[in-house]
Image (cartoon, rainbow, N blue to C red):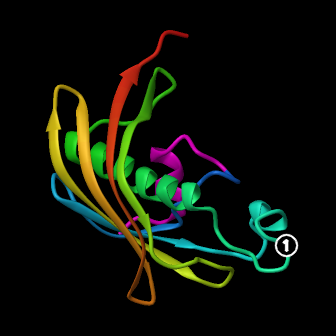
Amino acid sequence: MMDIYEILKKLPHRYPILMVDRVLHIEAGKDIKALKNVSANEPYFTGHFPSRPVMPGVLMVEALAQAAGLLSFATFGVQQDENSVFYFAGIDGARFKRPVQPGDQLILDVTLDRAKAGIFKFTGRASVDGELAVEAGLMCTMRRVVP
């Protein structure tokens, strides 16, 4: 549905913080399914943890937020530009259910729950091989910035 080149046009993130490799499905105003291939070459694995690499939970939540950003852009027909930023406004009820390690493919499922006055609320769930890894409520907003 959306390859890495399309994602790079929409999100401002770049390696090593870009956490969405492909969008598998997107329905504007409803939901998105995307994936993050977890590679042994990710820079955070050298310190988290050297003897048993585990993807940090905050980066799994960041991956969900980036997928939520792509869903927001599709829903409202806006394009990210140098004068706007999509920010996290809140994270609720984050729960980590299983470790994510090199070689895993993290499937990101995000549903838009509500959008009002520039604030977006989402439910995000990420899984590996059908097994839930993380779930969280996300709140995001897009703001114009003055250079």
Looking at the picture, how far across and down is residue 34, in whole percent? 40, 68
Q: Is residue 41 visible?
A: yes
Looking at the picture, how far across and down is residue 17, in whole percent? 64, 51
> Left or right: 77 with respect to 86?
left
Q: Residue at x 17, y 25 (%)?
A: 117
Does 71 sit above or below residue 80?
A: below
> Left or right: 128 with respect to 122?
right
Residue on which disc 1 sits: 50
Residue 56 in the magenta stretch? The answer is: no
Q: Residue at x 49, y 45 (%)?
A: 11
Q: Residue at x 54, y 51 (%)?
A: 8
Which type of secondary structure does the marked residue at label 1 adopt? loop
State which quadrant residue 54 falls in.
bottom right
| Position of the N terminus by quadrant | bottom left
Q: Amino acid at mark 1?
A: Pro
Q: Residue at x 57, y 77 (%)?
A: 99
State which quadrant residue 26 falls in.
bottom left
37, 119: nearer the viewer: 119
Looking at the picture, how far across and down is residue 67, in whole percent? 40, 56
State which quadrant residue 94 falls in.
bottom left
> Left or right: 11 with respect to 121?
right
Does 64 sit above or below residue 21?
A: above
Looking at the picture, how far across and down is residue 92, in whole percent? 34, 49
Q: Which residues are magenta?
A: 1-14
94, 17: nearer the viewer: 94
